[in-house]
């Protein structure tokens, strides 16, 4: 059977779909399934508002949801919404949680609609118009959700019909591939693409690639990657230092000498510009397809929590935190933060673009706190930078994520075993907490959320202190 989700996976990578269907026992259920599940869950949320809106249409009776089409050759499609027209034709509505029509890879929504149309036609429907229903990016919630303002109906009939011949051929190819009992499993096309393109099946299809390899080098150009691959040079010990950039060099050095690469001057440069007290700040945010509080729009990031560790020059540490108990604008969060952060002192974050973007968004939303929030932006530094060129351990494997750095440089502090242990789980946990009626479960989620965010900023403090000792003990 080939479903629409399968077909989208096929377009993204034929081999990964083959593996999933023909050898499910070795297929790593990873990010593609998670991504598909997230899209489906958001799609259902949006569909509820489409249903509300359609009830007011004069031809509401002619509209149906989740109709299934199946063909003898194994194609399976479920139309989000179908409208039966008086002339015997149908209109197809694909419902999406995006804020525009996505018409390019990796997830081309026009191809979804083309797949649905082909399967509908093969099962005897005559398709007249094809719509992509998506969220209106300019919609701002004010009270109850207004489905008419929230939704945009984009008539994509011409563009989708223009893709039918090509899509039909791809469906034929996908079915043929799935009928193959064996394929070349000795490598896959991501060999010449950077790690961000690899799916969880990369290791299965390329078992000979060492753990620390050319894919551990950040921002390796496509041309260099292709050269290394064509010459069969995958190991870091096969790459000369003069073949790579300043950012990539420390990773090779750390690998080859089997010790961390340390540039004390680089770390000192970072530390010397800091002004005490140091404010280690981290936000948790919730991005929801349907805005959950007034004044926000679809897919906007809503800060619901912060943790702040304050490190004083004499070594004392204070901790402040905030966690919204219900969906609310982040006004109170900002006011609490303002009460905890003094007029001077550097703000230390990990990946400062994220916190700074939130601060700028909140500065626009709250004019009274604008100066404070924009002041934070000016005072913010990025501790992650130290681990790009100042201190590089091969066990980071080319990553500068705090989840990679912490266990290496501060092994006694860990996210392991925490009920909530990453940002996605925090988002999910908060959503559960604000909807939980059982007070005990609610309190448990609250404790887990507070523990996770506190660890994020405590981890920064300890990593910073580790960097300080490198300078002090040189
Ligand atoms: S890593 Fe291989 S299997 Fe995975 S998407 Fe890339 S080509 Fe496909």
Image: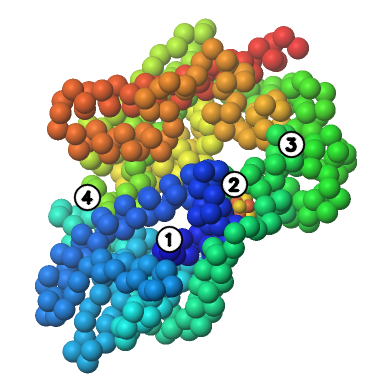
Q: Earlier in the sequence, mark 3 or mark 2?
A: 2
Dot label at residue 201: 2
Q: Which residue is mark 1?
A: 5
Q: Are marks 4 and 3 in contact (CB under 8 Å)?
A: no
Q: Which of the two discs, 1 and 4, sits closer to the camera?
A: 1
- Residue 233 in which image quadrant: top right
Cβ at disc 2 under 8 Å from ligand 1: yes
User: Residue 334 at what x, y percent from top left?
Assistant: 32, 34
**Distance of label 1 from label 2 (alpha carbons):** 18 Å
Q: Residue at x 27, y 25 (%)?
A: 446
Image position of 472 (left or right of 110): right
**Residue 286 visible in the current orientation:** yes
**222 left or right, relative to 118:** right
Per the image, label 2 sits on a secondary structure element best described as loop
Q: Earlier in the sequence, mark 1 or mark 2?
A: 1
Where residue 80 sits: x, y (%)?
29, 67
For label 2, the crowd category at 10 Å Cα-Cα, with few meaning under 14, some 14 to 19 and many 20 or more, is: some
Tell me residue 211's x, y (percent).
70, 34
**Quadrant (top left/top right/bottom left/bottom right) for the N terminus:** bottom left
Q: Residue at x 71, y 52 (%)?
A: 187
Q: Which residue is mark 4?
A: 294
The label shown at residue 210 is 3
**First in residue order: circle 4 vs circle 3:** 3
């Amino acid at each position: 059977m080939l479903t629409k989700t399968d077909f989208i996976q096929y377009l993204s990578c034929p081999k990964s779909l083959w593996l999933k269907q023909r050898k499910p026992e070795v297929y790593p259920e990873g990010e593609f399934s998670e991504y598909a599940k997230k899209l489906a869950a958001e799609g259902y949320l949006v569909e509820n508002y489409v249903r509300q809106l359609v009830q007011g249409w004069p031809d509401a009776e002619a509209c149906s949801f989740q109709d299934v089409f199946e063909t003898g050759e194994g194609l399976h499609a479920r139309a989000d919404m179908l409208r039966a027209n008086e002339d015997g034709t149908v209109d197809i509505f694909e419902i999406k949680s995006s804020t525009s029509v996505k018409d390019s890879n990796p997830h081309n929504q026009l191809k979804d609609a083309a797949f649905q149309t082909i399967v509908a036609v093969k099962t005897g429907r005559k398709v007249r118009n094809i719509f992509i229903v998506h969220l209106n990016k300019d919609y701002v919630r004010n009270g109850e959700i207004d489905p008419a303002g929230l939704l945009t109906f984009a008539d994509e009939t011409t563009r989708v019909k223009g893709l039918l011949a090509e899509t039909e051929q791809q469906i034929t190819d996908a079915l043929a591939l799935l009928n193959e009992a064996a394929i070349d499993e000795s490598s896959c096309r991501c060999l010449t693409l950077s790690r961000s393109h690899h799916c969880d099946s990369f290791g299965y299809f390329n078992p000979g690639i060492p753990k620390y390899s050319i894919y551990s080098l950040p921002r390796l150009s496509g041309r260099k990657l292709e050269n290394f691959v064509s010459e069969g040079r995958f190991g870091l010990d096969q790459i000369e230092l003069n073949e790579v950039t300043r950012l990539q060099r420390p990773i090779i050095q750390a690998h080859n000498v089997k010790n961390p690469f340390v540039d004390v001057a680089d770390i000192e440069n970072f530390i010397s510009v800091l002004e005490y007290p140091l404010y280690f700040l981290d936000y948790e945010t919730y991005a929801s397809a349907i805005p959950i509080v007034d004044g926000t729009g679809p897919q906007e990031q809503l800060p619901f929590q912060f943790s702040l560790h304050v490190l004083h020059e004499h070594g004392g540490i204070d901790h402040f935190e905030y966690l919204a108990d219900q969906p609310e604008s982040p006004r109170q969060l900002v006011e609490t933060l303002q009460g905890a952060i003094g007029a001077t002192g550097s703000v230390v974050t990990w990946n400062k673009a994220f916190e700074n973007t939130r601060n700028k968004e909140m500065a626009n939303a709250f004019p009274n706190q604008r100066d404070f929030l924009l002041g934070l932006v000016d005072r913010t530094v990025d501790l992650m930078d130290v681990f790009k060129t100042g201190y590089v351990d091969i066990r980071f494997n080319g990553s500068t994520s705090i989840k990679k750095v912490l266990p290496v440089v501060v092994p006694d502090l860990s996210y392991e075993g925490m009920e909530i242990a990453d940002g996605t789980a925090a988002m999910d946990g908060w959503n559960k907490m604000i909807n939980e009626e059982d007070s005990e479960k609610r309190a448990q989620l609250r404790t887990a959320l507070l523990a996770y965010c506190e660890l994020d900023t405590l981890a920064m403090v300890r990593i910073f202190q580790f960097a300080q000792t490198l300078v002090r003990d040189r």
